[in-house]
Image: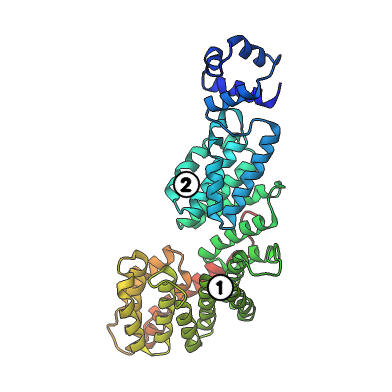
Amino acid sequence: MRLQEQKIILLRGAKKISQQVLADAIYTDVSRISTVERGLARYSDTQLEHIMRFFSIEHMPLSEFEVKVFYKMLYTMYRHIRDGRFIEAEALFEEMAKLINLEPCDDILPMLYRLFSVALMIYGRNNLDAAEKELEYISGKLDMMTDEQKYHYYFNMGALHIRRGNYEESLGFYQQALDISGSLDILEPKDIKRLYLNIASCYSYLEYPIRAILYLRDVSELHRDGGASMLDLHFDNLLALNYIRINEQDRAEKILKDCLIDARSIDSNYYCGLTLHNYGLLHKQAQDWDKAINYFKSAMEYYEKGSTWYLRAVNHTIICFAMKKNCSKARKLLNETKPLYNNDEVYRVIFKALDDFITIKSRISLYNQPVEYIETIALPYFEKTHDYYLAVDFYKLLESYYTDKNNKKSLVMSEAIRRIYERCFMGNERSGK
């Protein structure tokens, strides 16, 4: 019996359609249905057309040849999503929409279609709620999935959680995808590099720089063809950032020089801004405040005013102004930025703390400085949201402040700084590997 007839039997059974009802739908008699289902005959091309219309699976794959064609089409859709070609992905998504109706008779294609549709919801449409709802449905089928399907499920779960800022949960799912990836021939070097990048991104967001670097270095040369690509720009900027965090400034600067050339060669405002931003962090780490300020200001020109990256650059610029004792410029920039962050919960805390940062730096020799908000609200918040390096800026401020006052709380601040560095640099071994 051909695959077409086998699938039709499964569809009829799943939908509880009697042989008589199917016979009426395709303009034949019930004996014809019975003969085909016993493997003694085949449906004609005309009867197959009627059957496909009846089950709403027109132009969907029933034969072995068609199954292979649609499998390739699904991975074309997947690569469009992966590479940011969302218009092309949406077109294939619409063309293959009726694959879902084959679920009773096909364990492979409909599930891959659902999984790639989730990726489109996350990356192309930014509809995380819809993606989460579909993943909840898919999770009920996990025990019946192939390793290939499980890989895409875990990857999508990682992507959903990283988009929502749940980095520890995301990391767990990406690690499960990594565990499966070695057995899948369908994955390309670009897919593996992207997976390692996402794992490193989780560690970077959690501010474990050494762990991030270990993953990035493992595949740093994978899928490089000599040209500039978004993937490599993201990859290299992340590697440079984490080298900055561990004070490997020469390595970071070498990477950033190439990133700036590549970003400008493909006219990417985002990666020009990101690279200049990381140059700012490089010089801020070296306490070269003037250079850092210039780079952060240059980065701001590429960011949308009021965006997260714009506010991050402003935050670092204000700290640099304050550290070089140019508190009037720091205050001016803070006041100019206030309308942009008032409704942002995260930056409300940061910029309120920056207000006090400026005050303390401008009048550090005076008593009764505004340290309470920084100590009781801002610092616990920064650690809760994994902004440990930002917390260090404020702990160093308070350490200097209390040292100047000959107050033993300076030792508490010194210990907090030591604790954070120990936390961020601990674990040269990668968890889960």
401 shown above or below 152? below
Which of the pair 378/162 is nearer the observer? 162
Which of the pair 114/254 is nearer the observer? 114
Q: Dividing the image into 4 quarters, which one contains the N terminus?
A: top right
- Callout 1 secondary element: loop
Name the residue at 63% across, 47% down: 75
Q: Earlier in the sequence, mark 2 or mark 1?
A: 2
Give amino acid for label 1: Asp
* Mark 2 and mark 1 residues within 8 Å of each other at the beta carbon: no
Q: Position of residue 219 (x, y in %)?
A: 69, 63
Q: Position of residue 174 (x, y in %)?
A: 58, 52
Query: Which residue is identified by label 2?
Result: 131
Tell me how far mark 2 sits from mark 1, CA to CA: 31 Å
- Callout 2 secondary element: helix
Query: Which residue is identified by label 1?
Result: 267
Kindly tell me whether residue 63 is visible in this rendering: yes
Which of the pair 82/177 is nearer the observer? 82
Kindly tell me whether residue 391 is visible in this rendering: no
**In this rendering, position of residue 41 left or right of residue 15:** right
**In this rendering, position of residue 223 left or right of residue 243:** right
